[in-house]
Image (tube, rainbow, N blue to C red):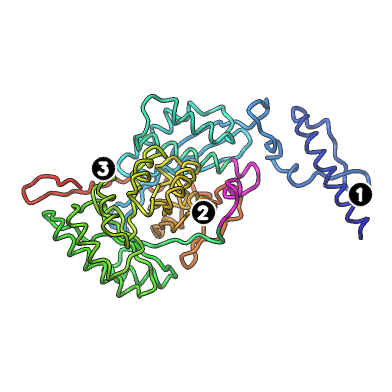
């Protein structure tokens, strides 16, 4: 038995040496010939038989490193609940390489779709074509710093989508799921929550449907907006919806409310006071989000209620003030806007310093979902992940992808992000013009929402 084990060790060592020789002679791999394993020589290990074997030692100085050959965006329009009203335009990013490996990312950005696709196709693609896609951080720094203007949602979203696609390429090149390249999993699964996205006739029916599917967490909005807008009257609507959902979901389901920043500080005080009896996991964007000051005041006034925000912030520099001023208990960075996979992890690390958890904002498509899952698996202070089911389009556009079962996602085992799309299906669903949210006060003015 010992001799057999010794032979196996020797063979592994030989394979390792052979791999190194292949790397040295990659300019002409035909110089090395492998015989069959029937006593005449060695068969190459599977990793050397794959098209990506040349990538095992990619470096910026290698004349034969993998190169980006094309970067392009794809728009896909998604109807809203029940297929009646426009809901989203998913923006997918495709990165092709000369090794035959293609990566995908998602840069979905409401109301700025054409600006984001132009940034991807006309500005960032020329910058990155010809470069090594596995140098993900270097590409991110170029997109962040090579242009004079920075910090806006258009450029940051375009960066986010491309960066995700580069991680997808890198994972496929090395034959590993992305989360393993990020340091491996710190949890066994990712917990998700559902939203009011099925087009049911009442909030209660939406919550009951989610619970019946196995979700143990559910998020809702403040109810149909009062016209003309009055935040005090909207508080009554929101509290009515919250009580209805609590009754339908039962006592064990964690509830969250997304207020969309529409309440004054005074109205938000009354709202959160009323929500105490409902019991909430967190209250999202209860007041105007232009500065962190309002949230700081609310968090001090309600230490028993988690305050969440952050979906409208881009990169770690914008999150700095909100964390250092103590504005939130839960940060909601969006992987399609904040800068991508690496930047979401960096924001999470900074949040951890302040004892803040991360619940990524994620009302988008299957690629953003997959990218978030990889980050959530490797982030110590992750709390919960948003999931919009967008049926049937979410499922039908995927050739294969992330599976949500009873509200949980198991670690994916496919290399890269683990999702592939049906591009013909994408092309069949064209761009939708999305209606803007509209608020008017009783005197006809636009309130500071």
Q: Which residue is mark 3?
A: 290
Label 3 crowd bin: few (<14), some (14–19), many (20+), radius 10 Å = few
> Does residue 126 appear in the picture of this structure?
yes
From this view, report whether residue 98 is shown above or below residue 375: above
Disc 1 from disc 2: Cα separation = 49 Å
Task: Name the spot of residue 225 as percent of width and height, x first.
Answer: 18, 57
Q: Secondary structure at mark 3?
A: loop
Give the mark, 3 or 1, whose residue is nearer the N terminus: 1
Q: What is the quadrant of residue 119 in the picture?
A: top left
Q: Are marks 1 and 2 in contact (CB under 8 Å)?
A: no
Task: Name the spot of residue 340 as percent of width and height, x first.
Answer: 46, 42
Task: Name the spot of residue 305 as percent of width and height, x first.
Answer: 32, 61
Which residue range is magenta in the image?
170-186
Give the mark, 2 or 3, whose residue is nearer the N terminus: 3
Label 2 crowd bin: few (<14), some (14–19), many (20+), radius 10 Å = some
Asked whether, in this view, residue 59 is left or right of residue 5, the answer is left
Q: Secondary structure at mark 2?
A: loop
Asked whether, in this view, residue 274 is left or right of residue 340, the answer is left
Q: Residue at x 8, y 46 (%)?
A: 444
Q: Residue at x 13, y 54 (%)?
A: 229
Q: Secondary structure at mark 1?
A: loop
Disc 3 from disc 1: Cα separation = 71 Å
Q: Which residue is mark 1?
A: 38
Viewer-nearest of discs 3 and 1: 3
Label 1 crowd bin: few (<14), some (14–19), many (20+), radius 10 Å = few
């Amino acid at each position: 038995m010992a001799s057999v084990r010794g032979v196996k060790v020797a063979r592994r060592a030989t394979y390792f040496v052979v791999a190194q020789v292949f790397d040295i002679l990659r300019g002409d791999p035909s110089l090395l010939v492998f015989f069959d394993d029937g006593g005449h020589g060695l068969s190459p290990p599977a990793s050397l038989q794959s098209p990506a074997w040349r990538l095992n030692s990619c470096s910026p100085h290698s004349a034969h490193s993998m190169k980006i050959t094309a970067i392009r965006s794809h728009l896909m329009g998604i109807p809203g609940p029940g297929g009646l009203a426009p809901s989203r335009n998913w923006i997918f990013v495709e990165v092709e390489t000369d090794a035959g490996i293609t990566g995908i990312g998602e840069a979905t950005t409401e109301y700025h779709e054409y600006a984001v696709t132009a940034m991807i196709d006309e500005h960032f693609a020329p910058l990155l074509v010809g470069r090594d896609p596995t140098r993900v951080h270097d590409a991110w720094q170029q997109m962040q710093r090579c242009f004079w203007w920075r910090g806006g949602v258009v450029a940051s979203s375009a960066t986010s989508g491309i960066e995700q696609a580069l991680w997808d390429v890198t994972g496929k090149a090395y034959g590993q799921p992305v989360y393993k390249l990020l340091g491996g999993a710190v949890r066994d699964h990712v917990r998700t929550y559902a939203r009011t996205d099925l087009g049911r006739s009442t909030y209660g029916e939406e919550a009951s449907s989610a619970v019946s599917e196995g979700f143990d967490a559910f998020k809702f909005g403040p109810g149909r907006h009062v016209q003309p807008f009055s935040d005090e009257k909207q508080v009554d609507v929101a509290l009515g919806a919250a009580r209805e959902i609590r009754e339908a979901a039962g006592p064990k389901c964690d509830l969250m409310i997304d207020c969309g920043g529409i309440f004054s500080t005074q109205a938000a005080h009354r709202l959160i006071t009323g929500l105490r009896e409902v019991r909430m996991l967190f209250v999202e964007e209860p007041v105007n989000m232009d500065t962190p000051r309002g949230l700081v005041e609310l968090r001090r006034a309600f230490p028993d209620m988690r305050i969440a925000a952050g979906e409208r912030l881009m990169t770690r520099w914008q999150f700095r003030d909100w964390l250092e001023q103590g504005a939130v208990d839960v940060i909601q960075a969006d992987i399609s806007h904040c800068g991508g996979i690496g930047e979401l992890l960096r924001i999470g690390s900074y949040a951890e310093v302040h004892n803040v958890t991360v619940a990524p904002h994620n009302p988008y498509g299957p690629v953003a979902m997959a990218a978030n899952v990889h980050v959530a698996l490797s982030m110590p202070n992750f709390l919960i992940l948003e999931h919009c089911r967008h049926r049937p389009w979410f499922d039908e556009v995927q050739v294969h992808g992330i599976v949500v079962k009873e509200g949980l996602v198991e670690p994916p085992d496919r290399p890269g992000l683990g999702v592939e799309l049906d591009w013909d299906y994408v092309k069949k669903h064209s761009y939708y013009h999305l209606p803007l949210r509209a608020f008017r006060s009783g005197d006809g003015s636009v309130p500071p929402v």
